[in-house]
Amino acid sequence: MALWDVYYTVTSLDDAIQLLSEYKEAARIVAGGTDLVVELRNNMRTPSVLIDVTRVGGLDKIHLGDDGLIHLGPMVSHAQAAASSLIQEHALPLAQTCWGVGGPQLRNRGTVAGNIITATPANDTITTLQALDAQLTLRSVRGDRVIPLCDFCTHVRCTLLEPDEMLVDIAFRPLKPEQRGVYLKLRPRKALAIAVVNVAVILTFAGDTVTAARISMGCVAPTIIDVPEAQAVLIGGSLTDERIEKAAELAADAAQPISDVRGSAWFRREEVVAMVRRGLESLRAGNERMGLPPVDEMVTLWGKTRYGPRLSGATVAHHSDGDEPIECTVNGQNVSVRGANGKTLIHMLRDDLGFTGTKAGCEEGECGSCTVWLDGIAVLSCLTPAPRAHGAQIVTVEGLVEEGQLHPVQEAFIEEDAVQCGYCTPGFIMSAAKLIEEYPHPTREQIKAGLSGNLCRCTGYYKIMRAVEKAAEKNA
Ligand SMILES: Cc1cc2nc3c(=O)[nH]c(=O)nc-3n(C[C@H](O)[C@H](O)[C@H](O)COP(=O)(O)OP(=O)(O)OC[C@H]3O[C@@H](n4cnc5c(N)ncnc54)[C@H](O)[C@@H]3O)c2cc1C
Ligand code: FES
Ligand code: FES
């Protein structure tokens, strides 16, 4: 069954705003689709019209404006934010936040804007951007309005966004030299796990004395909360053990968590104490960077392609019951596909084009078995609408074979017996091949990071990692 009726790929922001004004509640903007496609599949949202804004040039810019604020465009992905020198240097907690979202393929499509609009209290960037006092610009045919992020989210999944509005800018002040901050996320594993509790702390210092403090917390109330009582005990003195302990206890007192599958209310409160304490101690020790890789060592699975080509010309509509073709390149061949307008990319590739190497595992973004390259970057085809491929270049695992010769990663998987049932293998190979394009000689940590968006239920990871190392050795 089609997931939507009509899919517009707009080529200008004005077109998007006009379409929102025309369709209002019936329409949703689609950015990375990593929340929306899951919601559509689970009938949590039922818009008939999707407006894809990912092909509009310039919306993925991160820059320091003349107003002294850092601006993120609405298409800035988590990967771009984490790998931005500007963000790493002047908003470290946001880089840490974005680096911890999902896995690499998810970060390549998922945007900061989409994260804010979905507005669950577990959506990581909201906590940090609230601590940074971010403001949002919402645009409609009626004009622009600017809203502080702290007022924007009103309840779980509820915001002040009107149906005809689009979030067009996220802005916040860069941290000053006397300010330092940190973001911490408690989750069951390092990748592909939603927060059980998250905390962002930003302190202003005069020497050792704290002169201002901001602590924001997620997953402990229906919206992100600040804790003024905890902030107050930190101000006017240095970060002594006593002050840290008091602030952590006051933060836990302010938390009003629920019990759910990810953790009980009691556990969350205990973790608030531990995480606020850990955050403050790390700021005292000056080691708040906590393992965030520097920009030039960060694994993004972009390979050598930084940004995909934009679509030029007029806005394109693909009706799920229409016969407008999706025209794209798959494994170097031009294809024109009819009948896939209401599907996700994985089904177009498998069912319409017969590229069954790409596997459908969870179809919820959790396993990575559907990984393909879209305009040169690794993405999850189960969360990518098929019409997003229009005018794009797709590579599947079949496309890694050149003139009958397997890719070095494919060969190494065979040589190292890194395959058992094989279901996860194409996804791992697509991630690993992109990793080696990006870092011909990756470190163990980089291999772990590059494969962190892929799950294997049977072989285990040691052989897979050895296979990637072996493939890299062939690069010598
Ligand atoms: C396996 C998995 C793991 C995940 N892990 C994490 C995690 O660790 N942390 C986390 O916080 N989230 C996580 N998420 C959730 C999701 O990936 C993020 O929230 C992501 O940032 C959403 O961005 P997107 O671009 O994909 O949004 P989309 O899915 O495209 O859109 C999300 C919502 O925002 C609206 N929207 C998007 N952009 C705009 C705009 N500019 N103006 C108006 N409306 C807009 C859409 O209409 C939709 O309602 C995970 C999701 C999955 C499937
Ligand atoms: S992540 Fe796409 S099928 Fe599992
Ligand atoms: S080899 Fe079976 S899931 Fe990985």
Image (cartoon, rainbow, N blue to C red):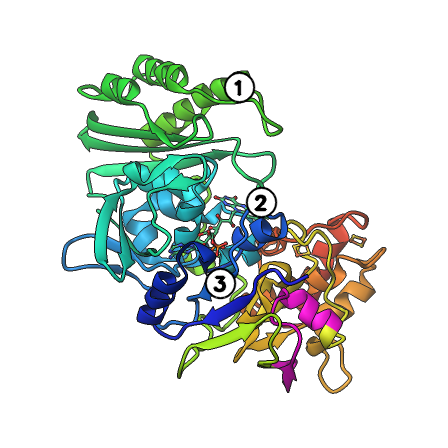
Say above or below: 45 vs 346: above
Position of the C terminus, as image quadrant, is bottom right
Say above or below: 335 vs 355: below
Residue 50, labelled with which disc?
A: 3
Disc 1: which residue = 265
Residue type at mark 2? Ala
Residue 255 located left or right of residue 382: left
Residue 380 on image: x %, y %: 61, 60
Residue range of the region highlighted in magenta in the rendering:
329-351
Q: Nearer the viewer, mark 2 or mark 1?
A: 1
User: Could you classify mark 3 by the number of other residues whose Cα lies within 10 Å: few (under 14), some (14-19), or many (20 or more)?
Assistant: many
Q: Which of the two residues, 41 or 20, is positioned nearer the viewer here?
A: 20
Cα–Cα gap, marks 2 and 1? 23 Å
Tag 1 or tag 2, which sits nearer the N-term? 2
Q: Splitting the image into 4 quarters, where does residue 335 fall?
A: bottom right
User: Could you classify mark 1 by the number of other residues whose Cα lies within 10 Å: few (under 14), some (14-19), or many (20 or more)?
Assistant: some
